[in-house]
Amino acid sequence: MPEGKIIKALSGFYYVLHQDHVIQCRGRGVFRKNKITPLVGDEVVFQAENNQEGYILEVKERKNELQRPPIANVDQAILVFSAVEPDFSPGLLDRFLVLVEFNHIKPLICITKMDLTNDDEQQKISTYAEHYNGAGYEVILTSSETEAGIDRLNPHLENKISVFAGQSGVGKSSLLNVLRPDLELKTNDISAHLGRGRHTTRHVELIKVGNGLVADTPGFSSLEFTNIEAEDLTRCFPEFLRASEQCKFRGCLHLKEPKCGVKLKVEAGEIPVYRYEHYVDFLREIKERKPRY
C-alpha cells in the first residue's frame, strides 16, 4: 500500500502528499471507533481508488503531537510574536515555550514588526532577546515590510517540518508571504477595539517553503497545561533545569524549599524575575487544575 503525509485537513477530508502528488482522502470508520483522529503531519498508509481520491487505512506512530494547533511530527516550532501591535507578551510566549518544550519540539523565537518600533521599544525588545538567548533560545528579529531578518530565518526551515504559531495578528501570514510571495495568504489589520488581530488562518496546512514544510496555523490567545504535571514544569524552563543541579533537595519545585539553585540564580539576576514569576503562576495553575476522570 502507498504511504504519504497529510498536508491539510479540511471538512472531513485529508489531503495526502505522495510523490509530489496530493490525493484527497477520507478516514476509514476504524479511526472513529478507536478514537484516532488523523492530524496534519501524520505519516499514513492509504488506498487510492484513482489519482484523485482514496482512503486512509493506517496512521503511523507519531514522534510528537500538538493539540492547539492540531499537528503531528513537528521538527521545530517557530513562535511568532510581534514587537508591537499587539505588544510583545513574555507571559504568553512563556506559555507557548512550556507547551513546546513539554512535547520535545525545538522552539525558535521570531519577533516581528520591528520596523514599527521606536527607540525605546527596540531597546526593550533587545533586552528580552538577551534574556531568552541566555535561557538557551535563539531569537530572530524580523520585519515583513523591510524583510529584515528573513535571511536568518530561511536556513532554519530547510528539510524540516516547522509549525508557525503565535497570538492572532502578530504577522504569521505576512511572514509566510515574504518566505513564499506566491502564496498571497490573507492578512488582516489589528482590531483597535480588541487590541489583537482578527483570525485569518482557518485551518492547519503544510506549505512547501524551499526544501521544508511550514504549517500556517490558526491564531489563538491562550493555552492550557492540560497534560503537564507540576514535576514536569521545571524541565520546560531550560535555565531552571540547569540551575536545579544546585538545589539541595531532589524534586525541588523552587518555591519555599531552602538552598534552591533556581531562586539563588533569580536573586543574583542570572534568571529574569519575570521568568520565575511566570513559572510560579503556571505551577499554581497546574496545582489548581480540576482533576480529570
Image (cartoon, rainbow, N blue to C red):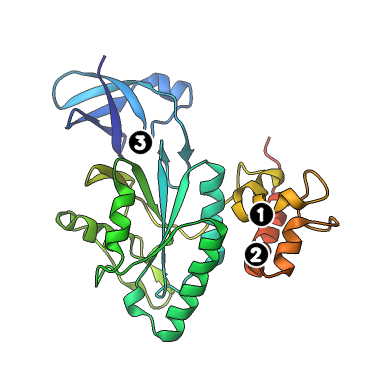
Q: Which of 46 and 144 is in front in this view?
A: 144
| Mark 3 residue element | loop
User: Is the N terminus in the top left, top right, bottom left or bottom right quadrant?
Assistant: top left
* Residue type highlighted by circle 1: Phe
Q: Position of residue 167 (x, y in %)?
A: 43, 61
| Mark 1 residue element | helix
* Residue type highlighted by circle 3: Gly
| Mark 2 residue element | loop
Mark 1 vs mark 3: give the one in front.
1
Residue at 41%, 46% (x, y): give it: 76
Placement of 271 over or under 106, stated as above or below = below
Q: Nearer the viewer, residue 119 or 2?
A: 119
User: Is the C terminus in the top left, top right, bottom left or bottom right quadrant?
Assistant: top right
Q: How far apart are marks 1 and 3 (CA)?
A: 31 Å
Q: What residue sits right under mark 3 in the picture? A: 41
Q: What residue sits right under mark 1 in the picture? A: 240
Location of residue 8 (image quadrant): top left
- Judged left or right of residue 244, residue 110 is left
Q: Which of marks 3 and 2 is nearer the N terminus?
A: 3
The answer to whether residue 89 is seen in the rendering is no
Mark 2 vs 1: CB contact within 8 A:
yes
**Tally of marks:** 3
- Judged left or right of residue 99, residue 240 is right
Q: What residue sits right under mark 2 in the picture? A: 271
